[in-house]
Image: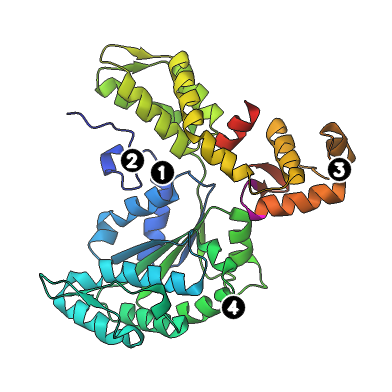
Amino acid sequence: MKRNPFVLTPAIPDELFCDRVSEVQSLVKSITNQENVVLTSPRRVGKTGLIYHCFNQTPIKENYITISIDVLHTTSFQEFVMELGNAVFQAVARRSDRLMKLFTSCLRSLGGSFGFDPLTGMPTFDVKLGQISKPEYTLDEIFSYLENAGRPCIVAIDEFQQILKYQGYNMEALLRGRIQKLRNTNFVFAGSERRIMNEMFFSDKRPFFQSATLLQLEPIEIQAYSDFVVHHFGAAGKAIDSEAITWVYQKYEGITMYTHKLFHDAYAETDEGETCMVTDVERLSNQLIQQNAKRLQELLAYITEQQKELLYAIATEGRVSQITSSAFVKRHHLKSASAVQSAAKRLLDFDIITEEGKTYSVSDPLLRIWLEA
């Protein structure tokens, strides 16, 4: 059975990884030079896939221990520590008996919380959230463990800006103070809210100021992506019209998650000897929108009427730079400039809209297309 080359998970085989040659070189170079990296991009462009791909490169795979966590769903420092502890347990402690014993001895604050596999007798990390009563102490123990892991360690933290939402702690200062003391561990701080990530790492008033090398990830260039699509269709004895590729790329703004999903489905539905046309990808696009309609409806249920009105106005114009101008307010029958400013702040907080260079747009192109329908 031939594998569909448009893989929809972040763990992509090297031969099916599209482009990103310069980005891979930059990230691998920074890691091997013991630099911390801040990796920013729009959401769904492929940050996680790039990190996994780089971790699989020979200079990294043969010389480093790699650990990855996604903290987007976390809401507290305790959850952050639990995610990190579990990832370190899976990636490091299970490599050898020595590292396992070291893990259980280092994490004294959780000493009575480990379970044991009834078949192997080895410890399991089944710590409950409530058992992490002093997360700062547990974090120190995890970092101490990584410092003694033998090989140098790389920790990738996806959606790192989420730490700003934890209550009761100055997470930036707390983490920065500990991370700068580490000698055996470096970090990749990844985030899709670029405005916030840039403020965190490049404002001289913030703890992480100039502590990491910046790597910005943009959508793959259309020519490179088009060549990739044509090649893999052709390798299976199939064809795809160039206008179909352009239509998908432009409609979804080159966002990898959606373009890959549509070409994944198009590849599956195109028989050998046939050609995928624009009408085919339009139909698949409509199916994708219908499949996500309920999720998008639920998203709008959490915002106010004024916020919805502003969202529709921005979606109508695509990209707009002066949302508080009298012309924009009148054109879309909005209440006032101050009401727009307040609504915009909330939509930015919810990551429903994005601001780049004082230009606003809908964060998710699928949401924009659904709003336009």
Q: Which mark is residue 285?
A: none
Precedes in sequence: disc 2 or disc 3: 2
Q: Which mark is residue 17?
A: 2
Disc 2 to disc 3, C-alpha distance: 47 Å
Q: Which residue is mark 3?
A: 335
Helix, strand or loop for disc 1? loop
Precedes in sequence: disc 1 or disc 3: 1
Q: Which residue is mark 4?
A: 168
Amino acid under label 1?
Answer: Arg
Amino acid under label 2?
Answer: Phe
Precedes in sequence: disc 4 or disc 1: 1
Write down the region rendered in magenta: 349-353
Precedes in sequence: disc 2 or disc 4: 2
Disc 2 to disc 4, C-alpha distance: 41 Å
Which quadrant would the N terminus be assigned to in this image? top left
Residue 196, can we see it?
Answer: yes
Q: Residues within 10 Å of mark 4 (few under 14, many from 20)?
A: few
Q: Which residue is mark 1?
A: 20
Count of numbered circles on the image: 4
> Of the residues tagged 2 and 3, which is closer to the observer?
3
Helix, strand or loop for disc 3? loop
Q: Residues within 10 Å of mark 1 (few under 14, many from 20)?
A: some
Helix, strand or loop for disc 4? loop
Q: Is residue 121 left or right of residue 113?
A: left
Residue 142: x, y in percent? 36, 79
Check contact, mark 4 vs mark 1: CB within 8 A: no
Residue 229, can we see it?
Answer: no
Disc 2 to disc 1, C-alpha distance: 8 Å
Q: Is residue 273 left or right of residue 219?
A: left
Q: Residue at x 64, y 47 (%)?
A: 354
Q: Is residue 201 left or right of residue 314?
A: left
